Image (tube, rainbow, N blue to C red):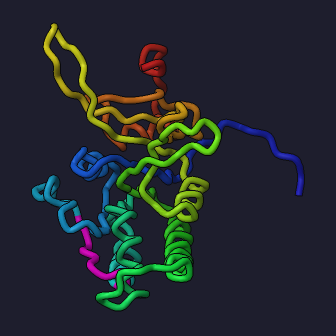
């Protein structure tokens, strides 16, 4: 092993977490990724892209992901980005394998077993030389230091730590009001930085802190993060 120097090489595969409230447009945004293939774990998740023509595999039980995996490995030229829609629902499907129907009480062993199954699946997915996008719902949690409420992806703590460690981009998608010519309108905004109230991350250091409707395109975001598109000063400070 010898010393290395950074030489500007930035051609890497993106691992991203996009999270937000149900109905905010996570699936629609994910459909703008390069050649997406969807694991549809949310029974309502595909309605917004029903006419898109994108390939997907419906996963109603966690074990069905093996069939999706078989298709993926035999059709590698037909997809470039895997979308898990949503990882929150996929986690819930894992619990169905552990608890029989009618059992309402979950103990720590149940969550631990489900968590191990989830991590094994995620570790295998991350080995693909493709982009991976995890869609998640959101929830509030208490910041242990400030005691403020923080918006984070809706996953058990161990799974949240694992996907966050392996993600290059973490963005919260939300609908926010703004004034436009004295008229109150709504715009979608993807926040890519951590402000103490909302989780966000951009390990490339090339993305703007947040992007709004006209730039909400994952192909564009990936190209910026990988250095294929250079932003001007105004765009980078958006």
Q: Quadrant of the N terminus?
A: bottom right
Residue depicted at 36% across the width and 43% down the height:
218
Residue depicted at 38% across the width and 62% down the height:
82
Depth check: give the residue in front, 210 or 108: 108
Image coords of residue 10 (percent x, y):
59, 42
Depth check: give the residue in front, 9 or 152: 152
Residue 161 vertical position relative to residue 11 in the rendered view, above or below: below
Image coords of residue 79 (percent x, y):
34, 63
Q: Which residues are magenta?
A: 55-63
Q: Is residue 70 visible?
A: no
Residue 204: in magenta span: no
Residue 114 vertical position relative to residue 177 in the rendered view, above or below: below
Which residue ends up furthest to the bottom in the rendered image?
100
Tell whether 200 sits left or right of 101. Answer: right
Tell whether 10 sits left or right of 211. Answer: right
Image coords of residue 83 (percent x, y):
35, 60
Which residue ends up furthest to the right in the rendered image?
2
Tell whether 5 sits left or right of 113. Answer: right
Number of numbered discs:
0
Depth check: give the residue in front, 28 or 88: 88
Residue depicted at 25% across the width and 68% down the height:
56
Tell whether 74 sits left or right of 116. Answer: left
Q: Quadrant of residue 24?
A: top left
Q: Quadrant of the C terminus?
A: top left
Which residue ends up furthest to the left in the rendered image?
51
Image coords of residue 150 (percent x, y):
48, 41
Q: Quadrant of residue 137?
A: bottom left
Depth check: give the residue in front, 120 or 113: 113
Residue depicted at 55% across the width and 68% down the height:
127
Q: Is residue 205 visible?
A: yes
Residue 62: in magenta span: yes
Residue 184 vertical position relative to residue 17 in the rendered view, above or below: above
């Amino acid at each position: 092993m010898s010393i290395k120097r950074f030489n500007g090489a930035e051609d890497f595969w993106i691992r991203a977490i996009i999270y937000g409230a149900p109905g905010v447009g996570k699936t629609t945004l994910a459909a703008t990724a390069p050649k997406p293939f969807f694991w549809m774990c949310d029974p309502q998740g595909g309605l917004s892209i029903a006419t898109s023509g994108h390939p997907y595999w419906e996963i109603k039980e966690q074990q069905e992901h093996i069939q999706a995996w078989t298709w993926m490995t035999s059709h590698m030229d037909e997809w470039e980005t895997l979308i898990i829609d949503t990882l929150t629902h996929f986690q819930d499907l894992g619990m169905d394998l552990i608890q029989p129907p009618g059992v309402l009480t979950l103990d720590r062993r149940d969550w631990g077993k489900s968590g191990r199954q989830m991590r094994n699946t995620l570790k295998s997915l991350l080995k693909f030389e493709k982009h991976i996008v995890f869609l998640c719902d959101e929830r509030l949690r208490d910041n242990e230091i400030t005691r403020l409420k923080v918006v984070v992806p809706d996953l058990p703590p161990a799974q949240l730590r694992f996907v966050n460690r392996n993600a290059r981009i973490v963005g919260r998608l939300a609908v926010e009001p703004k004034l436009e010519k004295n008229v109150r309108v709504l715009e979608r905004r993807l926040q890519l930085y951590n402000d103490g109230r909302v989780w966000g991350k951009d390990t490339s250091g090339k993305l703007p802190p947040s992007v709004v409707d006209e730039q909400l395109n994952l192909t564009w975001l990936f190209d910026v993060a990988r250095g294929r598109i250079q932003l001007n000063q105004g765009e980078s400070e958006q």
